[in-house]
Image (tube, helix red, strand yellow):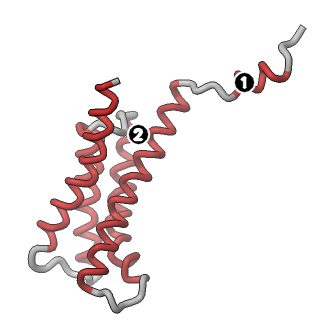
Amino acid sequence: MSAPADQRASADRRTTPARLASRAMLLGLLADVVCVLVFSLAGHQSHEASASQLVTLRIAWPFLVGCLVGWAVVARRSWTAYRVWPAGTTVLAATYVLGLLLRLVSGRGISGGFPIVTIVFLAVTMLGWRLVVGFVRARR
């Protein structure tokens, strides 16, 4: 005799390790994308506030591409998304290096203190959320 429909549906919704890992990856990617978008929005508001909101996307796209490349490495290696090392530093490095290179080749420039502000902001936010998650998980 087969299990009742309620039990089968409940079994389908169980959180397996693979589901938890993919959910953690998705949430981690979302957190890093938010970090890049906040960085871009802050830059837009500080330097080009009168320009259209499309400027935010023009600022963000090179760093979003770098972020996605970093996440591709993290996913390929099956690293834990919330760990500072190696996942966080890999995503940060890819976001920063590729973001600056793509920004440079796209004609947006990287003059003055922009590279310093960029690495500080991205490091504090992209590694910061991982430190908070790690701290919370350790306290459980």
Residue identifier under label 1: 10
Secondary element at tag 1: helix
Residue 64 spot, x, y in % from top left:
37, 63
Could you tell me residue 57's position as x and y percent? 40, 76
Number of marks drawn:
2
SS at circle 2? helix
Residue furthest left in the image: 112
* Residue type for callout 2: Arg
Residue 76 vs 125, above or below: the answer is: above
Please give the name of the residue rendered at 25% of the width and 47% of the height, measured from the top-left corner: 128
Which residue is denoted by mark 2 in the rendering? Answer: 76
- Between disc 1 and disc 2, the foreground one is 1
Question: Residue 3's spot in the image, x, y percent?
Answer: 83, 13
Residue 115 versus residue 75 in the image, above or below? below
Nearer-the-camera pick, 128 or 69: 128
Residue 45, by quadrant, is: bottom left
Which of disc 2 and disc 1 is earlier in sequence?
1
Q: Residues within 10 Å of mark 2 (few under 14, many from 20)?
A: few
Closer to us: 39 or 65: 39
Q: Is residue 50 above or below residue 82?
A: below
Task: Name the residue at 78% across, 19% down.
Answer: 7
Residue at 37% across, 83% down = 55
As drawn, the residue found furthest toward the bottom would be 50
Q: Give the crowd class for mark 1: few <14, some 14-19, many >=20 residues within 10 Å.
A: few
Give the CA distance from mark 1 to mark 2. 30 Å
- Most distant residue in the front direction: 139
Write the residue at 16% across / 60% down. 120
Pointers 1 and 2 in contact (CB under 8 A)? Answer: no
